Image: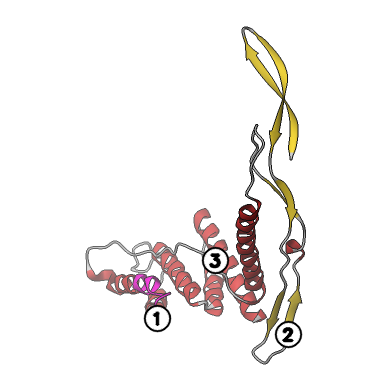
Amino acid sequence: MDEQQTNVRLGGGSSGTYKETQYHAEFSYRHPMSVKVFTPAGKEILSLTPPELNSYKIYKGGASTRPMDINTELLIKTLQEKTLQENLKFINNLLNDQFGYSKVKRIATLSYIKNDDAKYQDLTTAFNEASSALLMLQQDSKLAYTKLDKVEAIWTAALTEADMNNKKARINKDVAIAVYFNLLEAYFAQGNAASGQATLDKMNAINLSTNDRRKKIEFEVLFSDIKSRQQNN
């Protein structure tokens, strides 16, 4: 396609306009795809052609001031491959939203007690075991879950001696809050929505800082999403 464009020319202390013809490749396209989902028993539970994949789009290539020698076959092939990958990604996300889980990168945060004596040896052990478990979660989930079960028991036991009003207590308010958040990280890694929600409920009785409240709300959203997905599946 060609189109006239008005440009401005500056020089010699004056300015003027001139017409210029620009050329570009342009065409409409679509790549409809249908989706069907069956249960293991063979029952169809979803059949649709997403309208997002059935609508025409416009391809418009870069402009040139010279007529273009376009390799139409190569251009269409390249766009077709790109569109196919985009459609498959769309379908994958659609299916994950309704029936599965999407892989989402998330940084887990664990707290530990910086202390030179053996006063917090149990929490140090739990921190090291939990760090190891989270790192191996994708490679060996069974062993990772076993490690997380162990550290959850340690952290839960530590919380039984929490004294929120005594700053000198071994498990004072600051330590207890850190342990609660560690537990939430562990439960989230295991997809344990029930234990995660129970932990969040216990934290409702604690006067949290603004940052900790914001962090707690983030976990509430995460566990709510896990619970919703598990109920739908």
Whether residues under marks 3 and 2 lie with C-beta atoms below 8 angstroms apart, the answer is no
Q: Earlier in the sequence, mark 2 or mark 1?
A: 2
Q: Main secondary structure of the magenta part?
A: helix
**Residue at position x 64%, y 89% in the image:** 40
Locate residue 153: give its quadrant.
Answer: bottom left
Vertical side of 18 occupied by 35: above or below: below
Q: Is residue 22 above or below residue 229?
A: above
Query: Disc 1 marks which amino acid?
Result: Ala
Q: Is residue 162 toward the left or the right of residue 83 in the image? A: left
Number of residues whose C-alpha sits closer than 10 Å to that of mark 2, classed few (under 14), some (14–19) or many (20 or more): few
Answer yes or no: is residue 165 visible. no
Crowding near pointer 1: few (<14 within 10 Å), some, many (20+)?
few
User: In the rendered structure, which amino acid carries the disc numbered 2?
Assistant: Glu
Q: Are marks 2 and 1 in contact (CB under 8 Å)?
A: no
Could you say which disc has been placed on residue 219 in the image?
A: 3
Q: Which residue is mark 1?
A: 153
In this view, the residue farthest toward the left is 117
> Does dot 1 land on a helix, a strand or a loop?
helix
At x 56%, y 72%, the residue is 201
Q: Which residue is mark 2?
A: 44
Magenta region, residue range: 130-143
- Looking at the rendered image, the quarter that the C terminus falls into is bottom right
Residue, far top:
13
Answer whether residue 131 is magenta in the image. Answer: yes
Q: Which of 222/141 is in front?
A: 141
Whichever of labels 3 and 2 marks the residue nearer the N terminus, that label is 2
Q: Nearer the viewer, residue 222 or 175?
A: 222
Q: Nearer the viewer, mark 2 or mark 1?
A: 2
Q: Position of residue 223 (x, y in %)?
A: 57, 71
